[in-house]
Image (tube, helix red, strand yellow):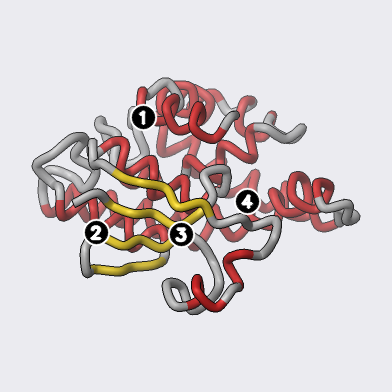
Amino acid sequence: MVVKLYGQVTAACPQRVLLCLLEKKIEFEIVHIDLDTLEQKRPEHLLRQPFGQVPAIEDGDFKLFESRAIARYYATKYSDQGTNLLGKSLEHRAIVDQWADVEVGYFNVLVHPLVMNLVIKPRLGEECDAALVEELKVKLGVVLDIYDNQLASNRFLAGDEFTMADLTHMPAMGYLMRTDINRIVKDRANMNRWWEEVTARPAWKKLMKMAGF
């Protein structure tokens, strides 16, 4: 059964799921939901995702929304296929989960409003909150120092292998790296080395081609 993903391939949260599907070599079909016309708020999509966001998936009779939950589901369901994203032992999996939780609680809460102000608002003709951007940059710098320290002794965030801990960061990081504040990553040697390595993966390259980036 081919997984049906409802979303927009250029959006960060659908990209998280798509990257997981590509790493796991799972067949999928994209049903485009146009965010520019607020198609995600229409009644038919609210039946799939009651909060009016993307992505949502249908896999036979099974339905699920929230990108991180979907990615974890497929990483678990197809654990013996494609890239092992969950970790090889109970302890390794705990470290993977730890850094995946860090992405939610420390990274995304800063990067999301940065991307909104630096990328989305200008595209919509809205004014960027420059003061907020400067405040968020300082806070993100503190967080990325911790990441850089972690990557000083680890090839990837959760150890020597690429896992969900790395994957879940990549869509938002990709947007951040296409802004004029990308030096916040490039000037941190370990983070920059990590970013160059994870973005060299075939699954990421294929996703960026799909998105037209």
Q: Nearer the viewer, mark 1 or mark 4?
A: 1
Residue at 29% across, 40% down? 163
Q: CA distance from mark 1 to mark 4?
A: 23 Å
Q: CA distance from mark 3 to mark 4?
A: 19 Å
Q: CA distance from mark 2 to mark 1?
A: 18 Å
Mark seen at residue 73: 2
Residue at 59% across, 60% down? 109
Name which residue type carries label 4. Val
**Nearer-N-terminus badge (1/4):** 4
Q: Is residue 187 left or right of residue 69?
A: right
**Nearer-N-terminus badge (2/4):** 2
Within 10 Å of disc 2 (Cα), the crowding (few <14, some 14-19, many 20+) is some
- Residue contact between numbered discs 3 and 4, judged by CB atoms under 8 Å: no
- Residue contact between numbered discs 3 and 1, judged by CB atoms under 8 Å: no
Q: CA distance from mark 2 to mark 3?
A: 14 Å
Residue at 55% across, 55% down? 108
Residue 99 in the image: state x and y as whole percent: 37, 51
**Nearer-N-terminus badge (3/1):** 3
Residue 158 in the image: state x and y as whole percent: 30, 42
- Residue contact between numbered discs 2 and 4, judged by CB atoms under 8 Å: no
Q: Secondary structure at mark 3?
A: loop
